[in-house]
Amino acid sequence: MSKGLDHETLNENVKKVQYAVRGELYLRASELQKEGKKIIFTNVGNPHALGQKPLTFPRQVVALCQAPFLLDDPNVGLVFPADAIARAKHYLSLTSGGLGAYSDSRGLPGVRKEIAEFIERRDGYPSDPELIFLTDGASKGVMQILNSIIRGSRDGILVPVPQYPLYSAAISLYGGSLVPYYLEETANWGLDVKNLRQSVSQARSNGITPRAMVIINPGNPTGQCLSEANLKELLQFCYQENLVLMADEVYQQNIYQDERPFLSARKVLLDMGFPMSKEVQLVSFHTVSKGYWGECGQRGGYFEMTNIPPQTVDEIYKVASISLSPNVPGQIFLGLMVNPPKPGDISYLKFVQEGKAVLESLRRRAHIMTNGFNSCRNVVCNFTEGAMYSFPQIRLPPKAIEAAKKLGKVPDVFYCLKLLEATGISTVPGSGFGQKEGVFHLRTTILPAEEDMPAIMESFKKFNDEFMEQYEDYGGYSRM
């Protein structure tokens, strides 16, 4: 007799989930690492795992919150700056019993207030702390909202392709339908509203009801930054089609060019005025995992709701209550991210210097990586305008595609496995994010230490040239 957790009796939606960032390549990389091979894990945006140092001030504050007995030590002022001590006391006063006590299921009211003030400074419009929910990383918030929107297999979620596989995985888990809309690689991963209209029309003809649309700005894995004109078009489209807009804005600090600074979907929506500013339903997501903080392991995130009916907010609160409380240290990190040291504070200069050093180095690394890929045979790569990734197109020769098929592998998985075995560089094949038929990519982070980057790109170039030499019948491909 079969049991409830036998594989054949599991929830079919669980078995449908695919998550390439921790998929076949990652598992093989972990095996090779156990065998003693040096692996460079560029498969996931995990800055501290690749050597980024934590910012000093937030760690000082959280250290004091975690060990409040240090605040009673007469020598605490010799080890910790006065502003870190004051902030630790402030955050402890917001809790009902320190970091070991549950908070409200939406998060600590005092931290939500700090986030609302940050949003108002950023966008120029007031924000309501009651419409901000803190979550264990932005991913949990995305899953919460998708779970609220998806009623069954005929509900569709428009997702940009290439996409971050959180979306395809969560949509599968909740039994919905992913409706892809393709970004244009030749237009620097730009967005054409005609593609959106075609995607919606095709979905409806297949009996799917589009309910929401996801944007990732800056893009993951594609690294593009949406312009104000682009955002207006998207919001207009959501207004016309009655779609909830889910704005994944976790990389808003990670901008590596000056032409298109980050603009939040909320600011652009409210700038557009009535009726759209009161009609379009928007949920925006942010996190401490990215930016120059990179605190992935702390699991601190939030979402803010705009134009969502009060009864719906109550239902989302009810479901959040099942988990009792988001983790409290992650909430403190969020408070510190949105309310960092100010000019005149003891820790201000050091905090600014540390953050600036991280962002300037990431900008340089984005250039090193893009230029490195574009110097390789049959590889072409758009510049990483924002976020933490490069997404080069690999022009695989027919013989390589044939060799992959013989092994039962997707061609870009075959290429990435060969790259891993030869160099120790662990990437994610483009097929894990979605891509146009017959086109192949890989995603790598730009996070390896800056001093290691030239050697990594040289290692990639050597592998790629030898791979192309092995599988090409003739002198190369023309570029896009």
Image (cartoon, rainbow, N blue to C red):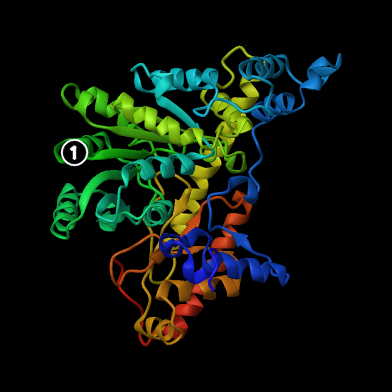
State which quarter of the image contains the N terminus: bottom right
**Camera-side residue: 330 or 355?**
330
Q: Residues within 10 Å of mark 1 (few under 14, many from 20)?
A: some
**Camera-side residue: 308 or 246?**
308
**Camera-side residue: 358 or 72?**
72
Does 155 appear above or below 395?
A: above
Q: Residue at (43%, 52%) from the top-left corner? A: 166
Q: How many marks?
A: 1
* Residue 360 left/right relative to 385: right
Residue occupying the far front of the picture: 1
Residue 313, given in percent of the width and then of the height, sits at: 36, 28
**Camera-side residue: 311 or 306?**
311
Residue 244, given in percent of the width and then of the height, sits at: 27, 38
* Residue 198 left/right relative to 9: left
Q: Say which amino acid is labelled 1.
A: Asn
Does 21 appear above or below 27?
A: above
Q: Residue at (52%, 69%) from the top-left corner? A: 7
Q: Residue at (30%, 48%) from the top-left corner? A: 151
Residue 303 visible in the shown view: no
State which quarter of the image contains the C terminus: bottom left
The residue identified by callout 1 is 242
Does 472 appear above or below 200?
A: below
Residue 294 visible in the shown view: yes
Residue occupying the far right of the picture: 74
